[in-house]
């Protein structure tokens, strides 16, 4: 039997053991007087290798276990967790959860998700691709990546190359009788390089993240990309303060989408800490723009048949024709708001931002630069200057000044500022240059105007 087949067989055995343990603990919780209970158990294994200047810096093998139990005595809730799956630790966790519940206040929103919402269909989403890479092979791969990057004239140093292989097993079970099993793999390659010297020194990086190692770009292509990005930043300038169009590169643009998701998520809404409070059914983006949740994408970074409470996931519009179609809710936040769960306990599952513009045409990256015309291309943002209560956005940034659709020179030490409400409404186009390395599938985003302040 191949190493990959052995890993798959072991994973199924581990999932079965976790499921049996979860069901047993739920039975014991009910016997202890709990009216309901739920268990989340996981096993994560991985290999991480870092290489710098051709030498091994770190090698780390991990095998982490987690077991979390929540019990309900009516609407009083107690939670406890452990990283030790031996019987004594599990019993202590159960005892602690029950003790906590007996001393907490009743919460009308507490409880399991509705039994009728539990997932019953579990199609294979192609998330399990063990990578049979040993330490020696991982080191060699890291060296190849770094060698490819360092071979470029002008690269003066390296912050190192990383190779990571990971497998994750998870079981969620509750006293409705639901038992859900999930297994997935995540692998990544990365390289960070330095160009120039002294005050001219610049640093940049590139990475790839996949479910299956067969989907990686080549080591040489990754090294070349990291070097090209680093060298392009040499001789960066600042800018005088101005207002201008701003184009966010895909890997940065998805952060703008993430801010929206945070603002329409249940926790922010029921705490009344969101600039998009009471915006369901209202226009927040241009009428041509659509954002859809697609939980069942094969090999998707956020794919799953059920959420963190066992609720079945379904394809659903988040923004339809520029209108916020719904919020992002688990059962608790939904009850707090007088609504129903959207199957998002634990987060969003694969958001796809449609490519397009008011003229209906989707553009690749070069086309997005032409749409920008003269303005700022942002390839890096820094700092935490995002206020989800007011929507105010002010962050340090770096990137490139673009003139007549062509990159003119790199820029740094600038600040970009606006309000997220205005930024979303002012989207001019979304690119077809989608970055596949995230659960937010988004191309570049062009905004009509932002304030750019120089150093």
Image: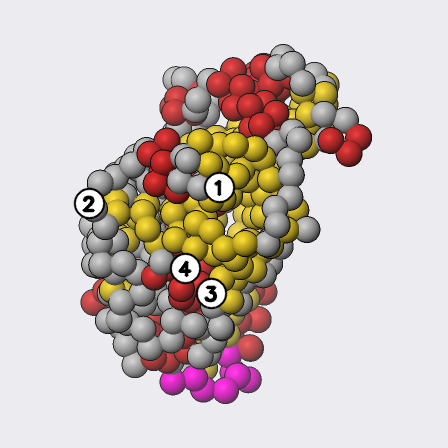
Q: Are marks 1 and 4 in contact (CB under 8 Å)?
A: no
**Label ID, residue 79:** none
Question: Where is mark 3, residue-wise?
Answer: 419
Residue segment shown in magenta: 101-108
Q: Are marks 4 and 3 in contact (CB under 8 Å)?
A: yes
Name which residue lies at 51% across and 67% down. Answer: 392
Residue 306 seen by the camera: yes
Q: Earlier in the sequence, mark 1 or mark 3?
A: 1
Question: Where is mark 1, residue-wise?
Answer: 377
For marks 2 and 1, give the CA distance.
22 Å
Q: Tag 2, which secondary structure? A: loop
For marks 4 and 3, give the CA distance.
6 Å
Question: Where is mark 4, residue-wise?
Answer: 423
Position of the N terminus, as image quadrant, is top left
Q: Residues within 10 Å of mark 3 (few under 14, many from 20)?
A: some
Name which residue lies at 52% across and 15% down. Answer: 220
Name which residue lies at 48% across and 37% down. Answer: 402
């Amino acid at each position: 039997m191949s190493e990959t087949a052995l890993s798959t067989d072991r994973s199924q055995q581990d999932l079965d053991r976790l499921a049996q343990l979860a069901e047993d603990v739920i039975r014991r919780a009910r016997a202890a007087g709990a009216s309901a209970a739920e268990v989340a158990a996981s096993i994560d294994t991985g290999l991480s290798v870092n290489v710098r200047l051709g030498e091994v810096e770190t090698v780390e093998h991990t095998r982490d276990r987690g077991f979390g139990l929540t019990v309900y005595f009516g609407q009083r809730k107690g939670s406890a967790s452990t990283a030790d799956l031996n019987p004594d630790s599990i019993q202590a966790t159960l005892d602690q959860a029950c003790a906590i519940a007996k001393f907490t206040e009743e919460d009308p929103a507490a409880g399991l998700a509705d039994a009728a919402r539990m997932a019953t269909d579990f199609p294979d989403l192609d998330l399990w691709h063990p990578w049979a890479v040993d330490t020696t092979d991982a080191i060699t791969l890291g060296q190849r990546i770094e060698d490819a990057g360092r071979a470029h004239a002008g690269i003066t140093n390296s912050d190192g190359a990383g190779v990571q292989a990971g497998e994750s097993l998870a079981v969620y079970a509750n006293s409705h009788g639901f038992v859900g099993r999930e297994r997935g793999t995540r692998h990544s390659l990365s390289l960070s390089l330095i160009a120039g010297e002294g005050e001219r020194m610049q640093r940049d990086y590139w990475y790839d993240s996949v479910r299956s190692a067969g989907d990686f770009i080549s080591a040489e292509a990754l090294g070349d990309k990291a070097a090209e990005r680093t060298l392009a930043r040499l001789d960066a300038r600042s800018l005088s303060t101005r207002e201008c169009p701003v184009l966010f590169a895909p890997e940065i643009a998805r952060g703008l989408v993430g801010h929206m998701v945070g603002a329409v998520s249940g926790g922010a809404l029921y705490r009344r800490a969101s600039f998009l409070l009471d915006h369901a059914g209202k226009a927040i983006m241009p009428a041509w723009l659509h954002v859809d949740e697609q939980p069942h994408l094969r090999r998707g970074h956020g794919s799953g048949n059920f959420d963190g409470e066992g609720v079945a996931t379904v394809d659903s519009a988040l923004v339809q024709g520029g209108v916020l179609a719904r919020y992002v809710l688990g059962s608790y936040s939904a009850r707090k708001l007088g609504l129903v769960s959207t199957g998002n306990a634990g987060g969003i599952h694969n958001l796809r931002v449609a490519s397009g513009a008011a003229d209906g045409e989707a553009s690749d990256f070069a086309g997005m630069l032409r749409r920008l015309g003269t303005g700022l291309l942002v390839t890096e943002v820094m700092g935490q200057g995002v206020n989800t209560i007011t929507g105010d956005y002010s962050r340090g940034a770096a990137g490139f000044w673009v003139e007549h659709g062509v990159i003119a020179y790199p820029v740094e030490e600038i600040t970009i500022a606006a309000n997220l409400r205005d930024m979303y409404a002012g989207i001019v186009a979304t690119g077809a240059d989608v970055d596949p390395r995230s659960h937010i599938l988004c191309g570049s985003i062009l905004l009509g105007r932002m304030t750019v302040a120089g150093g």
